[in-house]
Image (cartoon, rainbow, N blue to C red):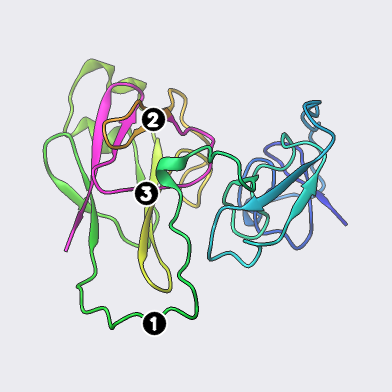
Amino acid sequence: MAIKCPICGHDVKPTAVFCEKCGVEISSIQDPSISQPPAPPSQEKDSYHLFCKNPDCKKHDVEVVVKHTSTHKYCGACGWLLEERGAEPQHQNYQLEPPPSPAAEKPPDSRKKSRGYLVMPDGSEREITTNQMPIGRADLSKNNPRSDIEAVSRVHITVWREDWKEREIYLVQDGETKVQEKPSTNKTWLRSDGQQKEEITGKGRLELKDGDQIIIADTVTLSFTLKQ
């Protein structure tokens, strides 16, 4: 029996770990009886053939046929964005590399593992670990005592690391996580390789690349760096 997501009102499958519409973790649902009105469906196409973008997800190559992308944006198994196969990725700067072929032989990797750090406005660094780390007004006011720091939410973004089979990935999210109750009020943007900034508020978790800039409330800029 499906339950209602308390954030967007979408009917969530009992086996899903994440809401397929908004990407919220189902474990955060307190009362399955809460009913919210679903968003109006899009009329762009009769049906969409979607695939999970996460190469390590068990549903990576499983086709999901839906009538409206407005009700199915996120994978129910891992929480990553769904997209049409062959379509231009919505966040192509942060798309994961495809997994290597099982038949390909690789020499032993003797490289040291990299560590990711968030560079604060005063130049200090915070190492990003597997524990979800909230960043908000109190963290940034210590290093950026400008009057417009009030535009930053109490908890504005969450950053953390995930250890996968062959590498580590670093993630940022402006939305509901284990340590963040809701998306920020004044939004967050991500800029990669000097390109135009892209709003990420409410768009699920995105992978950070070395040199990425996180722009908080259009007032404070943080940088992400990798070190051996």
Is residue 220 located in the magenta-colored stretch of the structure? yes
Q: Secondary structure at mark 3?
A: strand
Q: Residue 42 falls in which quadrant of the image?
A: top right
Residue 36 drawn at (x, y percent): 79, 35
Mark before the other along the chain sequence, 3 or 1: 1
Q: Residue extending furthest left? A: 123
Mark before the other along the chain sequence, 2 or 3: 3
| Residue 112 vs residue 4, the one in the foreground | 112
| Residue 61 vs residue 129, the one in the foreground | 61
Residue 111 drawn at (x, y percent): 20, 74
Give the Cα separation between the discs numbered 2 and 1.
39 Å
In the image, is residue 145 above or below residue 96?
above
Q: Are marks 2 and 3 in contact (CB under 8 Å)?
A: no
Magenta residues? 199-228
Identify the amino acid type marked 1: Glu
Say which residue appears at 25% left-offset and 30% top-offset. 221
* Residue on which disc 3 sits: 159
Mark before the other along the chain sequence, 2 or 1: 1
Say which residue appears at 67% left-offset and 38% top-offset. 7
Identify the amino acid type marked 3: Val
Is residue 223 located in the magenta-colored stretch of the structure? yes
* Residue on which disc 1 sits: 105
Q: Residue 170 falls in which quadrant of the image?
A: bottom left
Say which residue appears at 31% left-offset and 61% top-offset. 129
Could you classify mark 3 by the number of other residues whose Cα lies within 10 Å: few (under 14), some (14-19), or many (20 or more)? many
Q: Residue 48 falls in which quadrant of the image?
A: top right
Say which residue appears at 36% left-offset and 24% top-offset. 217
In the image, is residue 165 above or below residue 116?
below
Residue 8 drawn at (x, y percent): 70, 36
* Mark 3 or mark 1, whichever is nearer to me: 1
Q: Would residue 51 appear left or right of 95 to someone viewing this image?
A: right
